[in-house]
Image (cartoon, helix red, strand yellow):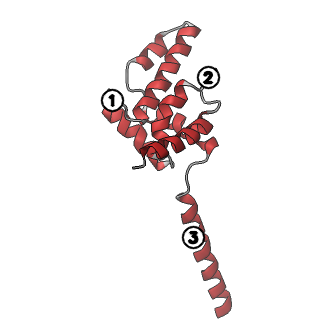
Amino acid sequence: MKLIALALLTTSMLLTAASAGFSQSPIKVGELEEAFIDGVGTCGPSSNVAGSLGRSTDPQVKIALRDALITEAADDAAAVAGSNKTHSDCIRKYLTSHGLSDNDMAALPYCVKHDWPDPFTNLGVCVKNHSRLEGALNKK
């Protein structure tokens, strides 16, 4: 009986340690797009673009406004000069809690601007590749 209890206790300790290790792992490439979109949805827009998006009936205008919202959110995530501080803090906190590093967030504006013709087709791959470059450039 003691042997069974010891085996159960050991197994539960191993599973707890394994799950704690997985929660600290970096974000996977495919999950990056989802985390970014969820972060934008959770924190909301930081300007009047969203209001204009809801009022417009022209599909081309809606596409342009949506792209502007995405670009603005990427700039806020990277905390570029002129970004909305509260929105930037919200998105950065959300993305950090989902495993993005500072280098990942610094790569977001470039990748969002160059991820065409459709946003998010290769965003995760671009961010991971450029975050390595950001990390190498920022080493002192």
Label 3 vs label 2, nearer the camera: 2
- Compared with 27, 127 (above or below) is above
SS class of the residue under badge 2? Answer: loop
Residue tagged 2: 116
Q: Earlier in the sequence, mark 3 or mark 2?
A: 3
Q: Can residue 31 be spotted in the picture?
A: yes
Which residue lies at the image location 53% right of the left edge and 44% below the top edge?
Answer: 132
Which residue is at the front of the view, 40 or 111? Answer: 111
Residue tagged 3: 16
Which residue is at the front of the view, 13 or 103? Answer: 103
| Marks 3/1: CA–CA distance | 42 Å
> Which three-letter amino acid code belongs to the residue tagged 1?
Ala
* Label 2 packing within 10 angstroms: few (<14), some (14-19), many (20+): few
SS class of the residue under badge 1? Answer: loop
> Which three-letter amino acid code belongs to the residue tagged 3?
Thr
Q: Earlier in the sequence, mark 3 or mark 1?
A: 3
- Compared with 24, 13 (above or below) is below
* Residue 30 in the image, given as x and y percentages of width and height: 64, 42
Which residue is at the front of the view, 7 or 110? Answer: 110
Which residue lies at the image location 64% right of the left edge and 20% below the top edge?
Answer: 117
* Residue 129 in the image, given as x and y percentages of width and height: 58, 40
Is 27 positioned to the left or the right of 74 in the image? right
* Label 1 packing within 10 angstroms: few (<14), some (14-19), many (20+): few
Residue tagged 1: 81
| Marks 1/2: CA–CA distance | 24 Å
- Compared with 111, 7 (above or below) is below
> Which three-letter amino acid code belongs to the residue tagged 2?
Trp
